[in-house]
Amino acid sequence: MPGLQLRGVAKSFRNTEVLSNVDLDVAPREFIAFLGPSGSGKSTLLRIIAGLETADAGEVILDDRRIDGLPPGQRGVAMVFQHYALYPHMSVRQNMAFGLRNARVPQDQIDRLVEDAARVLEIDPLLERKPAQLSGGQRQRVAIGRAIVKSPKLFLLDEPLSNLDAALRLRTRVELAQLRERVESAFIMVTHDQAEAMTLADRIVVFNDRRIQQIAAPMEIYARPANRFVAQFVGSPAMSILPATLADGGTLASVKLGDGSRIDTSVGRDSLPAGAQVELGLRPEHVRVVLSGEANTEATVDLVERLGERSLVYARLRDGQQVTAEAEGTTTAKVGDTVGLRIDGAAAHLFGPDGTGYHRAAA
Amino acid sequence: MRADRLSPVAWALVLLGAAIMLAPLVWTVLLSLKANAELVGNSGAALHGPYTLQNYAAIFGTSQTMRWLLNSAIVSLGTTAGVLVLCSLAGYGFARLDFPFRRTLFVLVLLGLAIPSQAVILPQHQLFATLHLHNSYPGLILPGLTTSFGVFFMTQYMKAIPTELDEAAMLDGASRFRVFWKVILPLTVPAQSALAVFTFLGSWNDYWWPLISATRSDMYTLTVGLAAAQMNYAQTSGLGFLMAQAVFASVPIFIVYLIFQRQIIQAMAGAALK
């Protein structure tokens, strides 16, 4: 099977397990983002694929060839490091040519490959410069160029945008998306920036606590998070999670919140586990600040963030539970006000006692 | 006032410092240019003429001086080259490779810093005698290659180089040795320059081991040879000649400094700023 397959990959450092029984399939030309908090194992997995760490167990297979026993240079992968890792004493040209020289590619071919890649990345005027004479963005391009010239089957990007300033990061993100269209390789990018993951990836792999929590397309992760962790980690601001009690009867679940309000969800009653205690998950866009007549509950405002086209209202329900709501950009709500909230129960998520997510039936 | 302009007081202090450091050197050179007989009883005669090069002529009059110069050059350059190779390899090993007893071995290396060479001179002498290495270049060079300081210095310097560079090179298909040779070693040039200067100076000025190991005059280094060529009571009756020897022995070091001035200053500044 072409592409990358991981089978039962596990890794411990001394007695601390950092990856446990990881399985993953990456299709050729697919762009995968590894997303997760620090220490969740995502970088370790990337390094295992690259050959910079050895897995304690499991297999890494690339295009039908088992590569976990091969040295990094023979795996057909290229990596862009977080701090670029350009060789400081070599010119841009030498940096890009180093891998090709090691592979004993003929010199005229090296020159052609390096110059072609430099033209694509618009770094051809910089070829004779040393890394110290380049800006952060230019170094980033050289690092990408060094990876491209080797025509790898798989690009590994370790937080490639984290060292760039906000404006450059946005531009480079667009360029990465364009690059991806031009090359035949698959991409795996480690990031803790969900915006990068959401905008670039075909699928996101969410890591936490040594395990893959969910593998799905970005909107699927957002709309149907597998569990409470994914629900809260993806989306900004985070989903509000409120303790709730299941009401009796009906094919769709209804829940009662701590402040007494009742929310009718679109989650199938049958799909839920036995027991009355659940948690209700609400994205801010599904909780609107409204006039009291349209409200199904009310809350006291703790903080208002005015973002221009909309405002975020951090509020507290009557039972003290915190909830994040959206309001018009022109809202007059201020700290200490009591406001009406309209909760869109049809878009709400439920989480069972073990954290598993339950959502409305897929459309 | 601009930061790079010195105040008059600072100028005065710098000049005073320079005078204090230069005075003994100037005094040595002046003494070396006076006839020995004139200096007996009154070394103050060095402050005025007539000056003469007869002491320098006398150095070359000793037939073996050029041979000793050659010996010193071979021993110092050989030691320096050997130290650079061994300390770079050992430094890379300690800084980058994971092997059993690495920490223990590194501690042993550091312990070497605390052991004076005099403490091991007897077994070392016997060992070299057993191996028939006395009165040979290997005999003069080998003891200088075991430098704890050099291994420690290169290890620390290489540890400061990001391991991402090694990893990038390995992903670029480089072997361990190629990573060392093409990526890490070129980045340690400042440290190598500093270590080379320290080693060369130490080896050039070494008197103790060549005095013991080289018993045949054709294997003397310059320091041993010149000392052996001194007549008795050199401090009084041969002061000019003694000073000429000192100047002569210092000239190669002075030349080394002139050639590598930039690297030496860079290395010292780099080491201080780290």
Image (tube, rainbow, N blue to C red):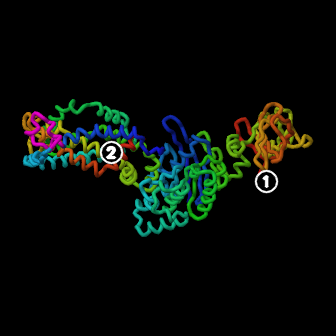
Residue B147 in the image: x percent, y percent?
28, 39
Q: Name the foreground residue: A234 vs B181.
A: B181
Choose mark 1 or mark 2, whichever is in front: 2
Q: Which residues are magenta?
A: B30-48
- SS category of the residue bearing label 2: helix
Which residue was labeled with disc 2?
B194
Residue A308 in the image: x percent, y percent?
77, 49
Circle 2: is it few (<14), some (14-19), or many (20+) Cα within 10 Å?
Answer: many
Q: Name the foreground residue: A247 vs B262.
A: B262
Residue plotted at (51% across, 39% down): A12
Q: Name the foreground residue: A239 vs B274.
A: B274
* Mark number displayed over residue B273: none
Residue plotted at (24% across, 41% down): B202
* Mark number displayed over residue A363: 1
Q: Is residue A100 above or below residue A314?
A: below
Q: Amino acid at mark 2?
A: Ala
